[in-house]
Image: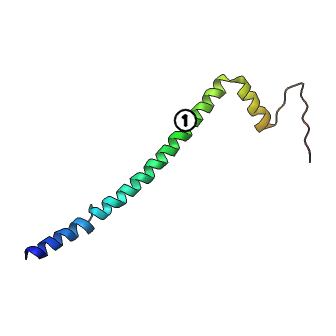
Amino acid sequence: MAIALMVVLLFLIVFSENGIRDYDQLKIKKAVVSSRIDVAKQENAGLEKQILRLKQDLSYIKHLARHEQGMAEPDELIFKQK
């Protein structure tokens, strides 16, 4: 009788809701979410740096205008090859 009770309790501990298997799955999910948070933090830091440069650095703004928007200074000529 005692052995049967112990087997049932062990089964419940391992396989029931909020058991060891669920705990292991939650640890895996936590690791995945933590890594996604770290990636988002790095991306946010990069965006904050870019925002600061856009607010303060005129040469950076000119660089972006030239290279990303194809703009030129009034005295510059742009030659494009086909």
Residue at left 34%, top 60%?
Answer: 24
Vertical comparison of 42 with 55: above or below: below
Question: Which quadrant of the figure has residue 51?
Answer: top right
Whether residue 80 sits left or right of residue 6 in the image: it is right
Vertical comparison of 55 with 3: above or below: above
- The kind of residue tagged 1 is Ala
Whether residue 20 sits left or right of residue 64 in the image: it is left
Residue at left 40%, top 56%?
Answer: 29
Give percent across and percent down for residue 3: 11, 75
Give percent across and percent down for residue 76: 89, 28
Give percent across and percent down for residue 56: 65, 22
- Name the residue at the front extreme: 3
Question: Which quadrant of the figure has residue 5?
Answer: bottom left
- Here the colouring is rainbow
Query: Of residues 40 and 7, which is closer to you in this image?
Result: 7
Residue at left 66%, top 28%?
Answer: 54
Secondary structure state at the residue bearing disc 1: helix
Residue at left 71%, top 23%?
Answer: 58
Q: Which residue is mark 1?
A: 45
Vertical comparison of 40 with 55: above or below: below
Whether residue 47 sits left or right of residue 15 in the image: it is right
Vertical comparison of 36 with 73: above or below: below
Give percent across and percent down for residue 8: 17, 72
Whether residue 9 sits left or right of residue 36 in the image: it is left
